[in-house]
Image: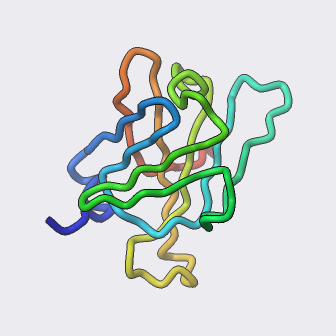
Amino acid sequence: MSPRTIQQALDANLKGFTIGRRLSIPFHCELISILVGKHRSFVGTPDIITDFSLSQREISIVERSNRMDLYFDRYESLQAELGHWKGTLIVTCCEDGDDIFEPKNHRRIEFVFRDDTSEVTIREYREEP
């Protein structure tokens, strides 16, 4: 089975899921950055992850045949940290094989967590005007 693209996952309204610090997403992509922000934080400064090398300790990435598993080492539970509108996780990425140096190929994908389910909604992120 070949990996799904970002667009295929969005078109099919596929969901991700989370268990503990793991986020499983139903597509492959080229990661550019990950923003993890808490809406109810008085500090309000999001964590921005841009180093995906094996030597760093913020995130581990495992590519499976039809999904990617992202392990956020800083958090015990993504659902507890970000569920019920407490925060947001936005991935800036591009499709595998696309030119990462071409800004028009960059996509911002938002992952919405809830308290009552391990299912994670995936949608294209649009900034509010």
Residue, far left = 1
Residue 54 position in % (x across, y down): 60, 65
Split into 4 quadrants, where in the image is the N terminus? bottom left
- Examine the image and state in which quarter residue 121 appears: top left
In the orientation shown, which residue stands out farthest toward the front? 55
Counting from the top left corner in percent of width and height, residue 58 is at 66, 50
> Position of 57 compared to 85: left or right?
right
Quarter of the image where one finds residue 52? bottom right
70 lies left or right of 53: left
Q: Nearer the viewer, residue 54 or 126?
A: 54
The quadrant of the picture occupied by the C terminus is: top right
- Relative to 94, is 70 above or below? above
x and y percentages locating residue 21 in the rendered image: 52, 36
The residue lying at 25 percent from left, 65 percent from top is: 3
Looking at the image, is 28 positioned above or below residue 102? above
The residue lying toward the viewer, choosing from 106 and 19, is 19
**Residue at 62% of width from left, 67% of height from top?**
53
Q: What residue do we see at 40% from left, 15% from top?
A: 116
The colour style of the image is rainbow
Q: Is residue 2 above or below residue 40?
A: below
